[in-house]
Image (cartoon, rainbow, N blue to C red):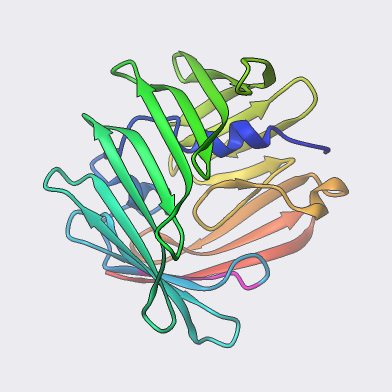
Amino acid sequence: MKRLIPLAAAVLIRACSANAPAEGLSSDLVRFGLNRPVKSLSVSMPEREFDYTVRFNGDGRIASVDEFAEDGSLAGTEEYVYDDEGRLVHMYHTDNDGQIDSSMSCEYDGQFISRQEYKGMNNDIQHCFENDNDGEHIITTRYYLENELRFVSRKAYEGLDMTETVCDTTGAVLETAYVEFFAADKPSRIRNNEDCMSVEYDEESGLPVASENCVLDSRGALQWEESLASEPQRTYEYEFDRRGNWIRRTEYAGQSPKLVITRKIRY
């Protein structure tokens, strides 16, 4: 694989509407593949991500995330703030000394994010996404780097399928991606004229069970890594606790285990 739609993938996470609950659960619980509300979730996958612990509030939304260095010491913390409607409005990242070194803020048009800003240590805007919606989906995203417009993404939907066209500031097309979804926020196939990544999900649990030209991180997001060039196909097997939530996921390339994720869940 050479270059798999990086711009489209960058804005794909903002393609869906809002923070709408799925199957009676918050979108945050669904993202972590949880089948019921929990108090906290501790994740370890040392070969690909740092360990972290997520704490959830009473509404099932993320309250905070502690990140840990390789030696087990606290590396940083994310704190999440919501408005009276349960919409995420701020995220503050603090270093291991408790100093804020970055932040994110959201503005809304109804339940849709209309503007999302990422600020650095000096409170300067580093990244910004501005969105337009049609009442059902976000259909246009403008991306700014340090207050300079860099590209515009336009999305057209047909059921759960989406075509995304990314243009530069002159309107010239940089790339076009075709995306199929298993469910909201769960792309099952992303392709352009040169490359394709795909994920197969279990119909009952919604958990990923196989992927090609991508791997799944601990939050279910699609990622690329160098080993995929020679081993593009992966499968995923799970071990579950008594409540039916997975506590161990093993990623295989053929018959060879590549990565193990372990989770501790506090109910």
Towards the viewer: 102 or 96: 102
Towards the viewer: 260 or 168: 168
What residue is drawn where x is 59% and y is 69%?
45
From this view, report whether residue 179 is shown above or below residue 172.
below
Q: Quadrant of the C terminus?
A: bottom left
Q: Is residue 197 left or right of residue 128?
A: right
Q: Is residue 139 left or right of residue 21?
A: right
What residue is drawn where x is 60% and y is 22%?
169
What residue is drawn where x is 33% and y is 15%?
134
What residue is drawn where x is 68% and y is 64%?
259
Place residue 58 in its image quadrant: bottom left
Instruction: Indicate yes or no whether the magenta region holds residue 82.
Output: no
Q: Position of residue 158 (x, y in %)?
A: 47, 11
Q: Position of residue 208 (x, y in %)?
A: 56, 45
Q: Is residue 20 left or right of residue 171?
A: left
Q: Position of residue 20 (x, y in %)?
A: 27, 37
Instruction: Indicate yes or no whether the magenta region holds residue 43.
Output: yes
Q: Which residues are magenta?
A: 41-46
Towards the viewer: 47 or 100: 100
